[in-house]
Amino acid sequence: MPIHRSHPWPQNESEALLIQEKLRSQTISTLDMPSVNPSVKYVAGVDVSYSADDTIAKAAVVVLSFPDLQLCDQAIACGPTTFPYIPGFLSFREVPPVLDALAKLTICPDLLLCDGHGLAHPRRFGLACHLGVLTNIPTIGVAKSRYIGQHDPLGEKRGSWQPLIDQGEIVGAVVRSRTGVQPIYVSIGHRLDLATAIDYVLQCTPKYRLPETTRQADQLASM
DNA sequence: GCGACAG
DNA sequence: ATCTTGTCGC
């Protein structure tokens, strides 16, 4: 699939900050895609792994059919690590190789589940937002741990969730994707709303704690 | 100053 | 992220 717009990649944190502030306004946080959308035929998952010495980044993308979640396409891209890991600036480290991997896909996904937060970010522009704005594909942030925000106690059953609140604003949801396991953190990235995001994430998580997209991308990235 | 801190 | 086995429990 073709990757259209991009931007110069920052060399340091302050340059990255300016880019976040600028791109943040381009994020679309409403549904421009129906909630139960028959046109969503392919859902993708992305993940990035690093060499032991942290010099090489390897991005992996898998495309699964939706809602049956069968593997339809996959791609990987390796390159030198160009940005350090700094909380709040993860996307500058992961987006470049992910865009390279996405460019190799034969099938263009209708939805992208990202391994990290989206709106649930101190400046409201996490990895999922960044990937969404640059690809214009609807994106969802699915993180394994909390970064910002507070929430009320969560029910134990699969499907229960609580809003994640930061500075008085709902930035995402804490979702029990499987009964009795640690919850996952869902936030919108681009072009959909939170309720829709939670719905898709649960549909992509039929058996394990993490969505099939994330699990398979994770597996592919660590090969 | 102290603690927290996606992957 | 990454270094890493067995083990408890549904």
Image (spheres, coloured by chain):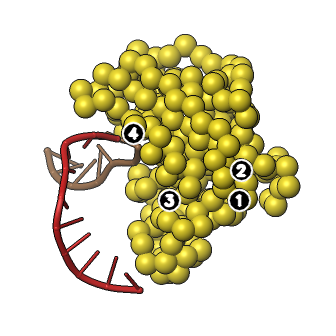
Chain colours: A yellow, B brown, C red
**Relative to residue A97, is residue A62 depicted above or below?**
below
Mark 3 or 4, nearer chain start: 3
Mark 3 or 2, nearer chain start: 2
Residue A152 placed where, x, y %? 47, 74
Q: Amino acid at mark 1?
A: Asp
Residue A213 placed where, x, y %? 57, 50
Identify the secondary structure beneath mark 2.
strand
Give residue A68's mark: 1
Residue A196, by quadrant, is bottom right
Identify the secondary structure beneath mark 3.
loop
Mark 2 or 4, nearer chain start: 2
Q: Chain of mark 1?
A: A
Observer-side mark, 3 or 4, equals 4
Give residue A222's mark: 4
Quick check: do tags 2 and 1 share a chain? yes
Mark 3 or 1, nearer chain start: 1
Does the residue at mark 2 contact the one at mark 1 (Cβ under 8 Å)? Answer: yes
Give residue A65's mark: 2
At 63% from the left edge and 59% from the top edge, which residue is drawn?
Answer: A204
Give the Cα separation between the discs numbered 2 and 4.
22 Å
Residue A110 placed where, x, y %? 75, 43
